[in-house]
Amino acid sequence: MAVLVGKKAPLFEADAVIDGGEFVEKFSLEQYIGKKHVVFFFYPLDFTFVCPTEILAFQEKMAEFEKRNVAVVGCSVDSKFSHWAWLNTPKNQGGIQGVKYPIVSDLSKTISTNFDVLAGEFDYNEDGEMEFNGESVAYRGLFLIDKQGVVRHQVVNDLPLGRSIDEAIRMIDALQFFEENGEVCPANWKPGDEAMQASHEGVATYLAKH
């Protein structure tokens, strides 16, 4: 698994569905560079079980992301038509109706591959034929990307393990606090807590108080 933290997020242009039902061609995260932080997350498949709980949980917290000037973008290996159908399926029927943030189609699996979250890979068998080993879906990867397009935080969960949206927001708060104040954030930091200077003296002072 690649560590992308500290590196530029891989670039892509792909089909997406935005605002709950509008098709967009050549969607790219580049539109946010210089303007917004981005939470870019992968989920395995449309019309599954853990996935809608995460997707809807992100939507329920959209006001929190928006007040932090953060764009939320989802992505899976499904087609844009599958995304559209799921977005237009009521929640009481297993759908994600009401979700407004962009959902990208990675039908070619190139985006998942470039972010190194694809749960399998192509290889050659004994007969020299190419075949896919593993599951051809994305792990539950999440990438926090700053305004310069650099990945500052990533977490990747296995397929059965849903993510904490509150933890994603906490990491945004920590990054933005560091960017604005220059102080680093200790374990379990949250807004309102004391941060510290990135020095031996700063650590010693902080630990002495706690």
Image: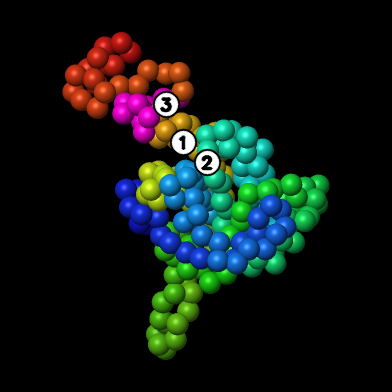
Looking at the picture, tell me which residue is in the foreground, 204 or 25.
25
Mark in front: 1 vs 3: 1
Q: Secondary structure at mark 2?
A: strand
Residue 147 part of the magenta segment: no
Furthest residue toward bottom:
127
Q: Position of residue 40 (x, y in %)?
A: 51, 50
**Distance from the alpha carbon under mark 3 to that under mark 2:** 21 Å
Q: Which residue is mark 2?
A: 70
Q: Main secondary structure of the magenta part?
A: loop
Task: Please give the name of the residue rendered at 68% of the width and 48% of the height, measured from the top-left corner.
Answer: 100
> In which quadrant will I find the N terminus?
bottom left
Return the disc, 1 or 3, that comes first in the chain's sequence.
1
**Distance from the alpha carbon under mark 2 to that under mark 1:** 8 Å
Badge 2 amino acid: Val
Query: In the rendered structure, are the residues bearing label 3 and label 2 in contact, judged by CB atoms less than 8 Å apart?
Result: no
Task: Please give the name of the residue rendered at 70% of the width and 67% of the height, measured from the top-left corner.
Answer: 81
Q: How many marks?
A: 3
**Magenta residues (range):** 178-190
Q: Which residue is mark 1?
A: 172
Q: Secondary structure at mark 3?
A: loop
Furthest residue toward top:
209
Q: Is residue 177 above or below residue 56?
A: above
Badge 3 amino acid: Asn
Q: Residues within 10 Å of mark 3 (few under 14, many from 20)?
A: few
Return the disc, 2 or 1, that comes first in the chain's sequence.
2
Q: Secondary structure at mark 1?
A: helix
